[in-house]
Each structure stands twice: as C-alpha cells, then as structure tokens.
Image (spheres, rainbow, N blue to C red):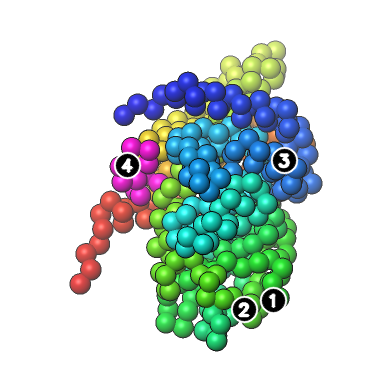
Amino acid sequence: MDLKLNDDQNMMKKVAADFLKAEAPSHVITDWYQKKIAHLPEIYKKTAGVGWLGMTLPDEFGGGGSSATDCGVVFEELGRGPLPGPFFSCGVLAAQILLDGGSAAQQKAWLPKICDGSAIVIPALSDDPIQFGPKSVATRATKSASGFTLSGTKRYVQDGDAASHFICAARTDSGGVILALVDRQAPGVAVKAVSGFMIGAAEVSFTNVAVGADALIGALDEGWPVVLAALTKALPILCAYQVGACQEIFEMTNEYTRTRVVFGQPIGRFQRVQDHCVDISIHLDGARWITYETLWKLDSGIAATAGAHQSKAVASEAYYQSCHFAHMVFAGAGTDYKHPLMAHSVLAHALYQYLGTPLFHKRAMIDAMYPRKTA
C-alpha cells in the first residue's frame, strides 16, 4: 500500500489551492458563513468548468473518469476553505446514486447535467434530523395510477436550499424504501431554510407530490441498498474534505501559538497550549490515514465498506474535536464570527451528524466486518 500522491495528484492539489486563493480566500469564505450564504452559483459553475463535479463519473456522462484518490485530493483542498456548496452532496453523492441505481435513460439525462452544473440534485434521505439508516425514512410513498404519491417532511437536508431536484427516500405500503427523483418546483414541494448553528440545511416537505414510475431510481423497495452502495464510494470523499479542514485548523492554530505573546513569550511555550495542538495533530493524522487508505482500497478494487464507515466516524469526530481544541487556544478571539475558525466550527457541527453520526458508522463498520448470521 502506497499512499503517496503522484505527480498528477500533486498538480490537482495545487490547482485546487490556487482556485481557492483566487475565487474564495479565507476572509471571503468567513464572510459567507457569517451571512449564512451556503451556495454561490457563480463559484459552482466555475468548479463545473474545471471538472470538479462528477469527477469519478465515466467520460461518457461528462465526468472526469478520475480515481477516488484524485477526487479526494481536490476535496481536501476545498475543505481547507471550507468552501460551502453542494459540491459533495450533488457532485459526488447524488451522482453516485444515479450511477449505481439509475436506469440508462436516467443516467443519460441527469449525469451530464450534474457535471456541467445545470442541475443540482440533492439527496433527501432521512426524515429524522439526527438518526440515519433505513429506519429513519418515514416519508410515505402511496401507490397511484401513474406511480406514487409522496407525503412527509425531511427535517434536515444538507444543501437543500440549493437544490433544483431532490432524490427523495420514501417508504412504501409494503415497508420497503424507494428513491424518487422530484423536481423542486413540483406541486406540493416546499423548502424552508433551517436556522441555527449550521449552514446550508433546509427542511423539505412533500405534500401529496405525484411522481411517475419512471422517476424511481433502482428497483421497487430496493432503494436503500443503492444508497449504501453509493455511500461506500462517496463517504471517503467527504472525509477528505474534513481532513483538509482539520489540516487548515492545525496550521492556523500553530501559527497563532507562535505569534500570540502573553507574559512576554509566545503562548506556544505553555504546555497546556502544546497539549491542545498535539490533540489536533492526533485527530488529523487518524482522519487522514484511514481516509486515504479507504480511497486507495476503492481504487485498488478492494472491499472498502468497513473502511468507508470507519473513515466517516473518525473524520467527523476529528473535525469536531479539532475545532474544540483550536477554540481552547484562540479563546475569545476564536468565537467571533469574523474569525476563520468559526466557519469551521459551524460546518464541523453540521457534518458531524450528516449521513450518520460517528456512533452510527462505528456500528456499521462492525456489522461490515462481522456480518450477523440470519436464520
């Protein structure tokens, strides 16, 4: 196993870093977070132009045909921002769901639109804002003459306010889960931004929304296996984004310990401050190595389900805890929304529970490693 980046990946890393410096420097991103601006269409279009949406999709659908590690390298740099927007939720997760479960017609119609940024398809999976998994799907799908009628409320949909379309998970009368493509402008669909210590989240309600049979992704009642297959390939990309965020926090915190002078000396000389920096470093290293090991497994054709769950558990915890220990160092200054650390704190809280908490993924990791015998 060799986790070193090759020349092309180092070039991708530099291009992504230069893009952020030019289009979204730290002080600008901090201002966006302070104003709760979670999606900037002009930035999103530019990322589509450089091929960062649908990077891992085949060329025939407008994707880049890139490896998982290639995509992870780019998303690591985006995480250093942290650049807000549906880059992962649409450009990675929704694209993977359609690639894994969509019909040939759906793939041909939607994947090129995702890649060029003309359609923003957002997965709306859990009805419960905290829980994840098939048990969290409560939206009902009632059989109709032409397909189904959807009714329910997704209380926490990351990047939901940016969506042009949704992939809605709903439970049928037989108890299975279906995935349906739903136009945001369809009658009965309502989107309301969720306020609080978060960014980009929306509550999405479906009230007797009619969808045709051709809107279903995957087989009837077999929607959740499609989600699980997509998550195995998509979660490590999200984790790479969190790794980049942890790296940025580590660097800004270390720099502060060298320049902040108290009692006539830099605060980095105080052992407790050093402890906080070490804690950030430990979380960063753990997240980085499990994430890139999982990306390597995906590229090598090795089973990576357990690794994907472990990556999400470790990276989400690392991002959350890195912000915590950085706040210990920055103290009051770091709690000002004009400080770049606050943007990370807001996003770290949101991503901690997005697509499942660390506890959920630790349990899923064990289930993947030691499958339970069924009668």
**Label 2 close to label 1 by CB (< 8 Å):** yes
Q: Where is residue 120 in the image (x, y as percent from the top left)?
A: 65, 54
Number of other residues with Cα within 10 Å of mark 2, as a class: few under 14, some 14 to 19, many 20 or more: many
| Residue at the disc numbered 1 | 188
* Sooner in the amino-acid sequence: mark 4 or mark 1: 1
Q: SS at mark 2?
A: strand
- Relative to 311, 76 lies left or right: right
Q: Where is residue 282 in the image (x, y as percent from the top left)?
A: 46, 31
Compared with residue 78, is residue 91 higher up or lower down, i.e. above or below?
below
User: Count the marks: how many?
Assistant: 4
Q: SS at mark 1?
A: loop
Q: SS at mark 4?
A: loop
**Label 2 close to label 4 by CB (< 8 Å):** no
Q: Quadrant of the rendered structure where residue 130 is? A: bottom right
**Label 4 close to label 1 by CB (< 8 Å):** no
Q: Distance between the residues labelled 4 and 1?
A: 43 Å
* Sooner in the amino-acid sequence: mark 3 or mark 1: 3
The residue at the point 44 percent across, 23 percent down is: 6
